Image: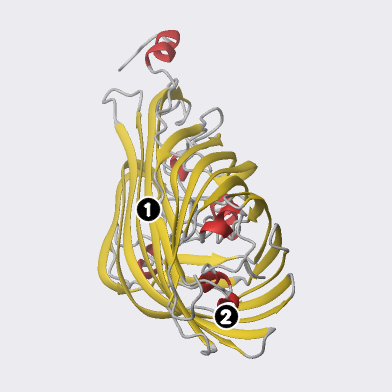
Amino acid sequence: MLQINSHMKRLLLVLYLFPIVICYAQDTHYWTYRFGTKAALMGGPAVGGLEDNSSVVYNPALLSFVKNISVSLNANIYQLSNIVAKNGAGPGLDVSSNQFSAVPTTVSGLIPKRQANRLTMGYAIIVPTEFTFKASARLADNKAIVADTESAGLEEYVGQFTNNTRVSENMVAFALSYRLTDKWSIGYSNQVTLRTHTFSKTELARMILNNAAATLVSTSEVQNIEYTNLRYSGKFGIAYKSGNWSAGIAITSPSMVLSGSGTVARDVTASNLTVNIQTNPNKAPVFSRVNISANDRQTGLKTTYKSPLAIAAGFAYNNKKTLFAVSAEWFNSVAQYNIMSPQDNLFKRPTNLALDGSEFLKINESNKSVINVAIGFQQVISPKLSLSTGFRTNNSFYDRTYDNRVIQTTRTTLSNNPLNLDISSWNIYHFVFGGTFSQERRDISLGINLSFASEGSLKQFANFDKPTESSFLLGQQTTSQVSFLSYGLLLGYTFRFKSTNGRQ
């Protein structure tokens, strides 16, 4: 029987947390990145018209009012992010990180045309989502978990988790705009998005009973998911321009799945864990130490990922010296659905475990409705220099029903709850400031982006506080407070071609 002085144990089994978190962009936000050299430096209020080829993405109807045929590249070339999840692994166990990373570029442009042609065409290759998150934590301590009649004193306890996820979306857009009159135009953009997502989570807990055999009691859960999904959505736009004023409305359709496949695997094990082996709910419970295993892996599953209906509107004022623009976009909610729907092929022991294999591997997703607003300003200082600034909200569409499900479940033995892969759940605010240096046929823009979220909330990665055997040697998960801060360096380049209509 292991006996160690309690003070020595607290010195030796020091409570310590090893956070390793990589985080750039977010996985539950629509407005993390803004596209186009001018739009990016103004925070993205481009639905009402900024007279550049970023309209392919924001409002295809505006392409008819673009004067110059050009190609643009822009990127957040460097970004430093800091995230702190207070009590992310239990009371006093904060998860924090500092990450330096590069963010992908975007390309957009217009196709040359003749002056008399009322039809304008444009294209864009963008990265609307690029999110990587890695977190890990470990706790070693002495805790009162088992009754003294079976294990006198405090039990040695170790809890540990790792969480890795990466989400990437790449979109190709092709837009057409038709000039109805000198003041009115309509447009339509075809948008095809490829989404790839890999996710892994490992959670384990161990304790030693204070008995003659020094019995090891352990639990663990491993999740591994990867999938791809190709989807299509269309964007219809209307634009109006008169003098220095322009305005526009853009409606994005709900997405349609084109193809996709994925793999999901999950394994849950427990050794020497006390559980109720009485299967008849009308009889008194019978507790015994048993071994438990549930395992399945399914490949080639069809995938579904949904983007919602979105409606955007905005206006802009441009007197050649001063440009002021405002935009807002409403995103509809998405009812809960399954990204993948596996069959019931579950291996489980004992065989009478109350587990449904189709639920055990099912992956849920849903989006709440959000509204984002952007406001931007540009001032021409000289023919070769203009300064820009902007602000935008970036509200999370994370559905709190998942938090409620985690909080409400008792986690008795095993849970039939489907999986949810979302991480970020906080609202972000972006400020940007920069300048554009112009030459005869090219513009170079440089800016700084500041993003922050203060006192948002996040479902706990794990909870090592007050572990019980009925909760698989873990504490009851709740939510933790999150602060997020990010600095980014913006770089843009635009080259204007000599067009066949005589304009540059």
Q: Is residue 415 visible?
A: no
Residue drawn at point x = 60 percent, y = 69 percent:
51
In the rendered image of this protein, does residue 149 appear above or below residue 358?
above
The answer to whether 53 appears left or right of 391 in the picture is: left
Q: Which numbered circle lies on residue 166?
A: 1
Residue 10 in picture, x, y percent from top left:
44, 14
* Residue closest to the eye, 211 or 403: 403
Question: Which secondary structure lies at badge 2?
Answer: helix
Q: Could you say where residue 373 lies in the image, as x and y percent from the top left?
A: 69, 60
Residue 78 in which image quadrant:
top left
Q: Disc 2, disc 1: CB below 8 Å? A: no
Percent position of residue 329, x then y: 66, 68
**Which residue is tagged 2?**
64
Q: Quadrant of residue 196?
A: bottom left
Identify the mark nearer the N-term, 2 or 1. 2
- Determine the image quadrant of residue 455: top right
**Can residue 103 be spotted in the picture?**
yes
Q: In the displayed structure, would residue 233 be above or below residue 89?
A: below
- Nearest the eye: 216 or 24: 24
Q: Residue furthest front?
A: 502
Identified by mark 1, the residue type is Arg
How far across and how far down the image is residue 151, in percent? 40, 26
* Kind of residue at badge 2: Ser
